[in-house]
Image (tube, rainbow, N blue to C red):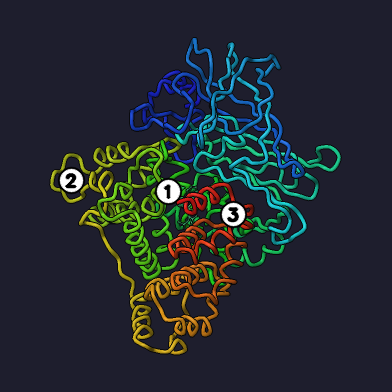
């Protein structure tokens, strides 16, 4: 297999991607993963021309300088080029490149092109026959993928923290490589960090304790031997401790967070087993999770072997572990079979949300899965409304270049797969999906490619079945096809009955909320009328302390309602929240609602943002900037 792959390299470079090259055997990964050259697989967000010269391996050697907020060192790239290719083009964003050499240290000519917003600047290197090139560079303090946290923004308050967030095209701000999800690369890294801090990355962790690297420094080494899209290269450095959760699972967190994190994550090992029983072996070795400080801009990020998680999922009752199911599911949908370009992002997020819900069903039963699906339906309806209704172009799964689709990729995508499951039957559908992951393992995929695969392996020209499925309407149409399968939760129906009683004038104290999880609270708050009398808001807050809820999901949903009512008593709690949490999913609705409330809200938003912006990740700040500048 290996020798065949080497011989096939030129073919791969040209885009020939015969299915035989995929790792059909679970466990095996191709040394060089194919790229796609069909028109719909073209990534406009990269400068790379992989059909001429492509990166196959990245070796990083970087020093982490907390004083200057700089990463400094080298990236050694293995290059596979067409015979006669003169140059290779890499993606960079605000990197300070000092020189480029071959692996013998001979200087190579290079030039940085003009920078575009978001996309950054192309770095063109004259190969001069080199098969490995060494880029000497530094990532600047403002690097968009990196967030440098001062000690006050950590749980321990003693030591600084650094993490990266690569998706979608941020990693070019600290790694000069071909930053496209369709150009997979293996990688290795050595990070040198100040003594007393631990470095972790999304790869095999070769030196868990680190090794001496000169006065006051330690080095940590990592290796990812499976080709991954570069957005999945991730690092974190901080005062971290580790605790095993099972034979191949464990949690990293700041020491003072470890107990709470481990309690919340107790089911992780079993989740991996449930996922494997659904769609085949977990192919990445270990599955560990890292609990970050609250500035982390997402709920979670599916970095291979090491999911990154917000600490806000920890509510003491394990009611948000669907987040873990989600990031774990990406180990198949996203990390194994990857959207070739970002407009095909629903192939990552929609498949994953479907898979997430199947894991939840396998772990906790049908009722729990239905409950989450029912809540998601509400969120989807709100998103479609926000997008401009059922005809709005941004409600399409296959997106346009540069457009943002928010939760539509997730929920409409997962509804699509649930509809396929329902029509084909679960057994047949599950067998198909397992085979799909295997057929396309370690390869990029497009919407067209998925539909072609489904037609080739399941529909096989059956016209009646084709008509029933409405594949093109799902993949390319706006709104929701009429075969969408909606699930309704009895537990949520019971919440709705209580909501009605309260809205009809019932007392807050009469609500039976003792066993409500995050999801029930969200349903209740979400279904309260958007306009409420101040005394009713006060009554609820007094009964349940919602403004100060330690559950960030509940608290942010409540604050959103309070803002919609310009309810002053919640403003201090709102300001505290905007200053302590960096998760975009919570922040965006709050700022959006503030802006919707005219001068009253805008004044609060702008005052808070002046001081809070500096504590947000660059991607969060960009999202809030866009809201406030509207
Ligand atoms: N891959 C995403 C996070 C992401 C999305 C990063 C877009 C950059 C751009 C991750 O898997 C995710 O979807 N997280 C969700 C989890 C939720 C759906 C359970 C989140 O962060 O809330
Ligand atoms: Zn996801």
Query: What is the residue that sits farthest to the right in this orientation?
Result: 215
- Residue 33 against residue 593 in the figure, above or below: above
Q: Secondary structure at mark 2?
A: helix
**Residue at the (73%, 61%) spot, across then down:** 156
Residue 16 image point, x, y percent: 38, 23
Q: Earlier in the sequence, mark 2 or mark 3?
A: 3
- Tell me if I can see residue 217 in this picture: yes
Q: Which residue is mark 3?
A: 296
State yes or no: Cβ of the residue under disc 3 lies below 8 Å from any atom of ligand 1: no
The residue indicated by pointer 2 is: 466
Mark 1 — residue?
280
Q: Position of residue 94 (x, y in %)?
A: 61, 33
Q: Left or right of 136: which side holds 211? A: right
- Contact? badges 2 and 3 (CB < 8 Å): no
* Residue 177 in which image quadrant: top right
Q: Earlier in the sequence, mark 1 or mark 2?
A: 1
Residue 315 locus on image (x, y percent): 56, 69
User: On the picture, is 149 further left or further right than 335?
Assistant: right
Cα–Cα span, label 1 and label 3: 31 Å
Q: Position of residue 166 (x, y in %)?
A: 55, 42
Separation of disc 2 and disc 3 at Cα? 43 Å
**In which image quadrant can residue 446 be found?**
top left
* Tag nearer the camera, 1 or 3: 3
Task: Compute the Cα span from label 1 to label 2.
Answer: 27 Å
Q: Foreground: 366 or 175?
A: 175
Task: Give the secondary structure at mark 3.
Answer: loop
């Amino acid at each position: 297999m290996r020798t065949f792959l080497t011989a096939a390299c030129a073919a791969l470079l040209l885009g020939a991607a015969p299915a035989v090259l995929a790792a059909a055997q679970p466990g095996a990964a191709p040394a060089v993963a194919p790229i796609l050259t069909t028109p719909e697989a073209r990534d406009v967000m990269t400068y790379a021309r992989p059909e001429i010269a492509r990166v196959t391996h990245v070796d990083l050697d970087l020093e982490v300088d907390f004083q200057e907020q700089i990463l400094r060192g080298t990236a050694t790239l293995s290059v596979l080029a067409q015979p006669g290719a003169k140059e290779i083009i890499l993606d960079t964003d605000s990197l300070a490149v000092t020189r480029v050499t071959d692996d013998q240290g001979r200087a190579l000519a290079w030039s940085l092109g003009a920078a575009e917003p978001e996309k950054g600047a192309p770095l063109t290197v004259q190969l001069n026959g080199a098969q490995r090139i060494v880029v000497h560079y530094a990532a600047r303090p403002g690097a968009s993928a990196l967030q440098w946290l001062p000690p006050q923004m950590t749980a321990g308050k003693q030591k600084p923290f650094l993490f990266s967030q690569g998706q979608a095209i941020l990693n070019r701000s600290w790694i000069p490589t071909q930053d496209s999800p369709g150009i997979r690369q293996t990688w290795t890294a050595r990070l040198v960090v100040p003594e007393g801090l631990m470095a972790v990355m999304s790869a095999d962790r070769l030196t868990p304790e680190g090794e001496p690297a000169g006065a006051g420094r330690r080095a940590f080494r990592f290796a990812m031997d499976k080709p991954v899209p570069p957005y999945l290269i991730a690092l974190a450095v901080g005062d971290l401790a580790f605790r095993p959760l099972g034979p191949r699972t464990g949690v990293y967190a700041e020491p003072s967070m470890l107990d709470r994190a481990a309690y919340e994550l107790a089911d992780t090992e079993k989740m991996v087993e449930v996922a494997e029983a659904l769609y085949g072996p977990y192919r990445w070795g270990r599955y560990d999770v890292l609990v970050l400080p609250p500035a982390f801009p997402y709920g979670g990020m599916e970095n291979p072997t090491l999911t990154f998680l917000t600490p806000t999922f920890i509510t003491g009752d394990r009611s948000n572990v669907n987040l873990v199911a989600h990031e774990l599911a990406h180990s198949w949908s996203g990390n194994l079979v990857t959207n070739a370009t970002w407009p095909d992002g629903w192939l990552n997020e929609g498949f994953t949300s479907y898979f997430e819900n199947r894991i939840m069903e396998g772990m906790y039963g049908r009722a729990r899965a239905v409950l989450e699906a029912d809540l998601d339906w509400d969120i989807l309806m709100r998103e479609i409304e926000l997008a401009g209704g059922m005809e709005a172009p941004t409600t399409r799964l296959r997106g346009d270049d540069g457009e943002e689709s928010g939760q539509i990729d997730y929920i409409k995508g997962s509804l699509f797969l649930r509809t396929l499951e329902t029509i084909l039957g679960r057994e047949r559908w599950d067998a198909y999906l397992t085979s799909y992951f295997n057929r396309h393992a370690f390869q990029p995929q497009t919407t067209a490619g998925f539909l072609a695969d489904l037609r080739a392996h399941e529909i096989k020209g059956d016209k009646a079945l084709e008509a029933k499925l409405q594949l093109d309407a799902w993949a390319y149409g706006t709104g929701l096809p009429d075969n969408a399968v909606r699930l309704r939760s009895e537990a949520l129906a019971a919440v709705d009955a209580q909501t009605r009683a309260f809205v009809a004038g019932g007392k807050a104290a009469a609500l039976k909320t003792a066993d409500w999880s995050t999801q029930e609270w969200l349903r209740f708050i979400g279904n309260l009328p958007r306009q409420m009398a101040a005394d009713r808001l006060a009554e609820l807050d007094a009964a349940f302390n919602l403004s100060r809820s330690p559950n960030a999901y509940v608290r942010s949903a409540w604050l959103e309602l309070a803002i919609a009512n310009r309810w002053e008593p919640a403003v201090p709690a709102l300001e505290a929240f905007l200053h302590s949490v960096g998760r975009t999913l919570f922040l965006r609705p709050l700022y959006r609602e503030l802006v919707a409330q005219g001068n009253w809200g805008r004044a609060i938003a702008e005052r808070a943002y002046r001081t809070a912006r500096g504590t947000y990740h660059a991607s969060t700040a960009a999202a809030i900037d866009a809201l406030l500048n509207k």
